Amino acid sequence: MDNYKRVQEINKELKIDAVLISNGNNMRYVSGFAGETGYLYISDKHHMVITDFRYTYQAEMEAEGYEIVTIGSGGYEEAINDILRTDNVKGLGFESKDMLYSRYQDLMDKLNVDELIPINDEITRLRRIKTPKELDYIKQAESIGDKVFSEILTFIKPGMTELEVAARIEYLLKIHGGQSTSFPAIVASGVNSSMPHAVPTLKKIEDGDFLTMDFGCVYEGYCSDMTRTIVVGKASDKQKEIYKIVLEAQLAALDVLKAGLKGKDVDKVARDIIYKAGYEGCFGHGLGHSVGLFIHEDPRLSPSEEGIIEAGMIETVEPGIYVRGFGGVRIEDLVVVTEDGYENYTHSDKSLIEL
Ligand code: ZN
Ligand code: ZN
């Protein structure tokens, strides 16, 4: 991978001699190294993985073309100091949104460098626009979700607990090729579905319950994310009404979505529909987020997102209405934005399913 060249450009722009990348997803994105511990060190002369013995072999396999440094008994500080000495570094950048304060203090104490310079999310921003290969991984991850959704519908019966359904979803995600879940599956029934990020409980699913299922898996390192809400049994008029508004809001947002818009403009389209229908105060989260190596990436679709949505970015579109003491609905698709619209990677049915 020669993404290190893009990092060298960033170093130049930020006027730093070298950068220490600590965010695991950034490390993986830039170098290919997917180990859990280590740093990437990138200067004009070097691009290097610094890790410990447990990951040396993996780093050699994954980070093609990189120098691999295994730390000794002097730890990371000694290994980094060795490099700084030969590389004549005065200002060393670090990822301020990732590094723990205690770690930063440690480096301040022990590194022989004039200045440790906090950099913001410049490296993370490299990951916003996906390559065709990344898009393919995300598409495959989402297609696993589609399979799981159709299979879980044949499994759910009144009397089962939310935890049983969540466990089954996570099992099926792996059976179909997901390496792990991209987050613990959300399964929320009845009044619990009024909590957008409910944790599955021992509550039994009852006839007439809304059932919201939000889940995803990781494929080749890349996450998927989808949500469907169904009714177990016959839907009431109020359930039908809420569902219809959420679906209308979702379709309207998808309808306008294309490259060049601000995240907040897309959010507003869905939000206006929900608020005008009388549910102001019942949709308290953003309309969507980007997805990649990490489940929640920027730019968002939210009331405060000034960022421009560009072609090749992944976004979820997931409006919801949550009525306290009653229940809630969320419908979430995952799409890639194109110049004149989007391609939807989620194919599961969005009409109201009554099981
Ligand atoms: Zn989700
Ligand atoms: Zn989501």
Image (spheres, rainbow, N blue to C red):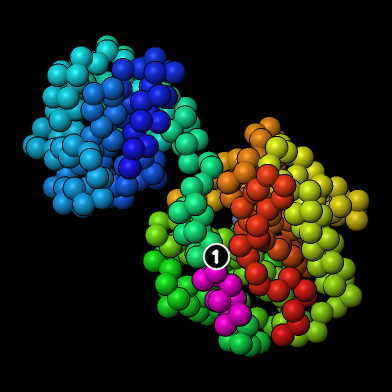
Q: Which residue corresponds to the image point at 39% horizontal and 66% vertical from the top-left?
A: 179
Q: Nearer the viewer, residue 125 or 245?
A: 125
Q: Nearer the viewer, residue 215 or 313?
A: 313
Residue stretch rendered in magenta on the structure = 143-152
Q: Which residue corresponds to the image point at 58% horizontal and 72% vertical from the top-left?
A: 146
Residue 312 showing in the rendered view:
yes
Say if 195 sits above or below 106 in the image: below
Say if 181 sits above or below 261 in the image: below
Count up the numbered dots. Answer: 1
Task: Residue 278: name its quadrant.
Answer: bottom right
The image position of residue 327, as x and y in percent, is: 75, 67
Image quarter hosting the C terminus = bottom right
The prevailing secondary structure element of the residues shown in magenta is helix
Relative horizontal placement of residue 20, taking residue 252 as reference (left or right): left
Relative horizontal placement of residue 137, taking residue 146 as reference (left or right): left
State yes or no: residue 145 in magenta: yes
Q: Which residue corresponds to the image point at 71% horizontal and 63% vertical from the top-left?
A: 331
Say if 134 sits above or below 239 in the image: above
Image quarter hosting the N terminus = top left
Ligand 2 appears in which quadrant?
bottom right
The image position of residue 95, as x and y in percent, is: 39, 30
State yes or no: residue 182 in magenta: no
Extreme left residue here? 73
The image position of residue 42, as x and y in percent, is: 29, 29
Secondary element type, mark 1: helix
Residue 201 showing in the rendered view:
no
> Crowding at label 1, few (<14), some or many (≥20) Cα neighbours within 10 Å?
many
Q: Nearer the viewer, residue 317 or 308?
A: 308
Q: Which residue corresponds to the image point at 68% horizontal and 44% vertical from the top-left?
A: 339
Relative horizontal placement of residue 134, taking residue 188 as reference (left or right): left
Residue on which disc 1 sits:
142
The image position of residue 18, as x and y in percent, is: 30, 22
